[in-house]
Amino acid sequence: GLIDYGMGNIHSVTKALESLEEEIILIKNNKQIKYCKALILPGVGSFDPAISNLINTDLIVDIKNWINSGKSFLGICLGLQLLFESSDEGSIKGIGIVKGQIKRIPQLSGQRIPHVGWCELLPTRKNSLLRKNELNNWVYFVHSYHAVPSNTNLIAANVSYGSEKLTAIIEQDNLTACQFHPEKSGKTGERLLRRWLKNIQ
């Protein structure tokens, strides 16, 4: 199930999943969720308009219940950020299923904001998407804000940006979310999506 709330990269995510021979249901209301075995929350744009649109779908409680029930869930880019309690980008509360905040990327000498381009994933612990000693996991980022979870053990991979380490993947049990765009990350993104799909509960 691909949650369609008017601010997701629906087309590219749909194409990526269809290329992996997955059937996609666009979720616009909670009645459609019962037909799904997993949910994906994509996202492109700003925090407040996105959370407002999501509120208007009446799906926030269903998203929380889905994750709390142990069913597979994937957040992508802004879809990761919406899972947190709040964001420096706006004033509306996030879904709050993940404790912590979304912070503006620090302005560092020689580093542009937004952070746009390809970077290599740096695993911080064992996780379902990356393999031990696997090299050259380069993925595509477009963001000006990054996730700072209260529990740093949720961080499964970082990415280097100047002297900073930014959260690239968070994972806890059935919940996985990535700041990058796997659907725009070529063969690496395809591989990571395949692994997520394989682990669907």
Image (tube, rainbow, N blue to C red):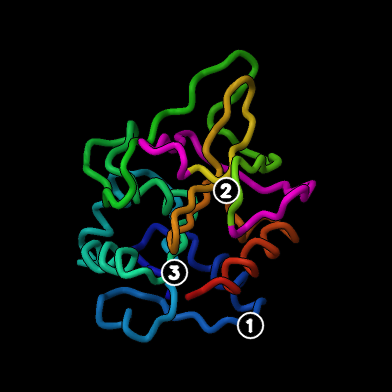
Dot in front, 2 or 3: 3
Left or right side of 105 for 129: right
Is 139 colored magenta in this rendering? yes
Q: Determine crowd level at label 2: few under 14, some 14-19, many 20+ residues with C-alpha closer than 10 A.
A: many
**Amino acid at pointer 2:** Phe
Q: Determine crowd level at label 3: few under 14, some 14-19, many 20+ residues with C-alpha closer than 10 A.
A: many
**Amino acid at pointer 1:** Glu
Answer whether labels 2 and 3 touch (C-beta < 8 Å): no
- Relative to 194, say whether 102 is above or below: above
Q: Position of residue 190 (x, y in %)?
A: 68, 64
The mark nearer the N terminus, 3 or 1, is 1
Q: Position of residue 22 (x, y in %)?
A: 58, 81
Dot in front, 3 or 1: 3
- Relative to 25, say whether 15 is above or below: above
Q: CA distance from mark 2 to mark 3?
A: 19 Å
Q: Is residue 42 visible?
A: no
Q: Position of residue 119 (x, y in %)?
A: 69, 39
The residue under label 1 is 21
The mark nearer the N terminus, 2 or 3, is 3
Q: CA distance from mark 3 to mark 1?
A: 18 Å
The residue under label 3 is 72
**Amino acid at pointer 3:** Ser
Residue 69 picture quarter:
bottom left
Q: Residue at x 59, y 44 (%)?
A: 125
Element type at marker 1? loop
Q: Residue at x 72, y 46 (%)?
A: 138
Element type at marker 2? loop
Q: Which residues are magenta?
A: 128-154
Q: Residue at x 48, y 66 (%)?
A: 10
The residue under label 2 is 180
Element type at marker 3? strand
